[in-house]
């Protein structure tokens, strides 16, 4: 778990968050302890000083394996490491779960986008799949953000797909995610020449669609696929599998 424990005033005046962080005001740490079993947690404040230290200390006293981020979010920004922009217009403020809605029977973008949102934008986000002609009506009823459909705030732009649009909307800059975006774009826009892995992602996605009639079950099953692709993009793209077919011995006959 990653917790943003900045004071309310400092949290409100900043438009940035650490990817995947949950908001927990300093005076709400005790409530979090009461609501969750102990686990691993990293907390961060503005500069990594007393607020973060105190929150980590309180969590450790309650049995958590708690650490605080030295330098805080400002140190992260100065180091050029990824942060995300808050987007209240898209329901992403760090203070309540965002809601997202798209067309039923997802294949690629409508699975890749929920993965990106859950892992980097809002861990508590909720996703809805409905028939195409009901997306905007249900979006109003649920107060959800439509995505990957024409005229939605997050959708295809030019030769870019909805995954690309999310990265741009939240100003999320990460080389591994950019590499993954290229794979997703190639698979989702039928340009399999963009990345050798695009064809494999397309095949896996179509196979999952055949295996799962329930869209949320398919999303759950596909999450590790994107976790693995992201891990590959981060540090395994140069690794090769070196097994070779043994040479055939010549016959003396």
Image (cartoon, rainbow, N blue to C red):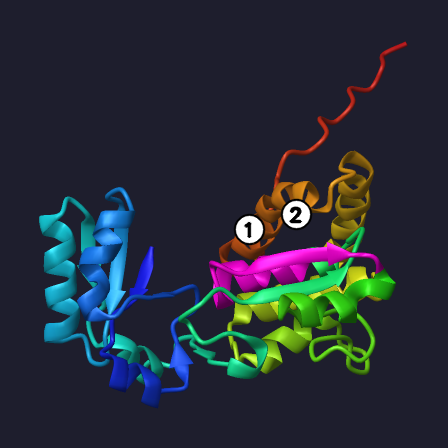
Horizontal and vertical percent for residue 232? 56, 53
Q: Is residue 202 above or below residue 153?
A: above
Disc 2, SS: helix
Of all residues shown, which one is farthest toward the front?
A: 141
Quadrant housing residue 91: bottom right
236 sits left or right of 101 in the view: left
Q: Which residue matches tag 2?
A: 219
Mark 2 Cα shell of 10 Å, populated few (<14), some (14-19), many (≥20) = many
Q: Quadrant of the C terminus?
A: top right
At horizontal 69% and vertical 76% (from top left) the residue drawn is 154
First-in-chain label (1 vs 2) = 2
Instruction: State whether residue 209 appears in this view.
Output: yes
163 sits left or right of 99 in the view: right
Horizontal and vertical percent for residue 170? 54, 79
Disc 1, SS: helix
181 or 249, nearer to the observer? 181
Instruction: State whether residue 238 appears in this view.
Output: no
Asked if the stretch drawn in magenta spans residue 60, the answer is no
At horizontal 26% and vertical 45% (from top left) the residue drawn is 39
Q: Which residue matches tag 1?
A: 227
- Mark identifier at residue 144: none
81 sits left or right of 87 in the view: left
Q: Quadrant of the N terminus?
A: bottom left
Distance from the alpha carbon under mark 1 to that under mark 2:
12 Å
Task: Name the front one of labels 1 and 2.
Answer: 2
At horizontal 50% and vertical 59% (from top left) the residue drawn is 119
99 or 5, nearer to the observer? 99
At horizontal 39% and vertical 76% (from top left) the residue drawn is 17
Q: Are marks 1 and 2 in contact (CB under 8 Å)?
A: no
Mark 1 Cα shell of 10 Å, populated few (<14), some (14-19), many (≥20) = some
Q: Which residues are magenta?
A: 112-131
């Amino acid at each position: 778990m990653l917790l943003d424990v900045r004071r309310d005033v400092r949290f409100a005046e900043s438009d940035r968050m650490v990817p995947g962080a949950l908001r927990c005001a300093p005076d709400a740490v005790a409530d979090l302890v009461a609501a969750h079993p102990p686990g691993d947690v990293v907390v961060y404040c503005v500069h990594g000083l007393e607020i973060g230290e105190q929150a980590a200390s309180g969590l450790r006293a309650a049995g958590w394996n708690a650490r605080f981020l030295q330098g805080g979010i400002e140190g992260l920004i100065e180091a050029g490491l990824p942060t995300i922009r808050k987007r209240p217009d898209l329901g992403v403020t760090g203070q309540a779960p965002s809601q997202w809605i798209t067309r039923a029977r997802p294949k690629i973008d409508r699975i890749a986008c929920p993965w990106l949102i859950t892992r980097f934008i809002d861990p508590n986000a909720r996703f809805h799949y409905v028939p195409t002609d009901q997306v905007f009506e249900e979006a109003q009823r649920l107060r959800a953000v439509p995505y990957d459909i024409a005229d939605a705030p997050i959708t295809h732009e030019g030769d870019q797909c909805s995954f690309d649009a999310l990265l741009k909307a939240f100003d999320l800059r990460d080389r591994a995610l950019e590499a993954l975006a290229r794979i997703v774009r190639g698979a989702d826009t039928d340009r399999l020449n963009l990345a050798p892995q695009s064809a494999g992602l397309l095949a896996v996605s179509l196979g999952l669609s055949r295996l799962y009639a329930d869209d949320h079950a398919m999303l759950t099953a596909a999450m590790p696929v994107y976790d693995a692709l992201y891990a590959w993009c981060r540090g395994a793209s140069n690794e090769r599998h070196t097994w070779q077919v043994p040479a055939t011995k010549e016959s003396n006959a």
